[in-house]
Amino acid sequence: MKTTINTLIQAATDAYAHAYAPYSHFCVGAAVLDEAGTVHTGCNVENAAYPSGSCAEEQAIGSMVAGGGRLIRAILITGLSDQPITPCGACRQRIREFAQSDTLIYIHDQHRGTLGKYRIDALLPDSFGPDNLSKS
Ligand code: THU
């Protein structure tokens, strides 16, 4: 597992280095480990029309889906901030879509290293998900 975390840290850090954040100057990188063991990355991509920007997690999950992945085994988010960068509300829901109860969500900082580890239920309790749409 240590090797996996280090792989995710490196992958997310590489994506972080490519973040496009000319407006907030708040760069974020994310790396997702899918059910096949493949790692997918993303960074935040801002836009002059501010609401059109996207989060690092959103990009990483989109990359996973485009690559055929359907399950997030682990996701690591990295940046450089005084406060741990936990996923925004919309990204919690995006993670929820492809998470299981044992999916791990790691929070990492470029200076301080790994700061925390969460499960989706802690970040998005009593959530609405795919099961809610299945007919009885
Ligand atoms: N951001 C992310 O990419 N992920 C997060 O978990 C928090 C926020 C981005 C969105 C925006 O480009 C910048 O960080 C400031 O909110």
Image: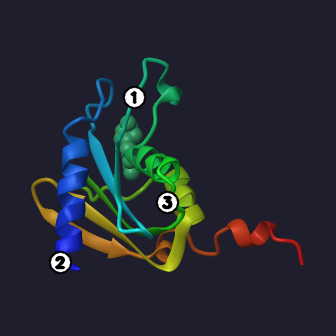
Q: Is residue 70 above or below residue 30?
A: below
- State the image quarter where residue 18 is shown: top left
Query: Quadrant for ligand 1?
Result: top left
Horizontal and vertical percent for residue 107?
29, 64
Horizontal and vertical percent for residue 15?
25, 43
Q: Label 1 to label 2, Cα distance in Å?
A: 32 Å
- State the image quarter where residue 126 is shown: bottom right
- Which of the marked residues, 2 or 3, is nearer the chain's N terminus? 2
Circle 1: residue type = Glu
Can you name the residue that lies furthest to the right here?
136
Q: Is mark 1 within 8 Å of ligand 1?
A: yes
Circle 2: residue type = Lys
To which residue does mark 2 refer?
2
Left or right: 122 with respect to 74?
A: right
Which residue is located at x 38 percent, y 45 percent?
56
**Mark in the foreground, 2 or 3:** 3
To which residue does mark 1 refer?
46
**Which part of the image, by quadrant, shows the C terminus?**
bottom right
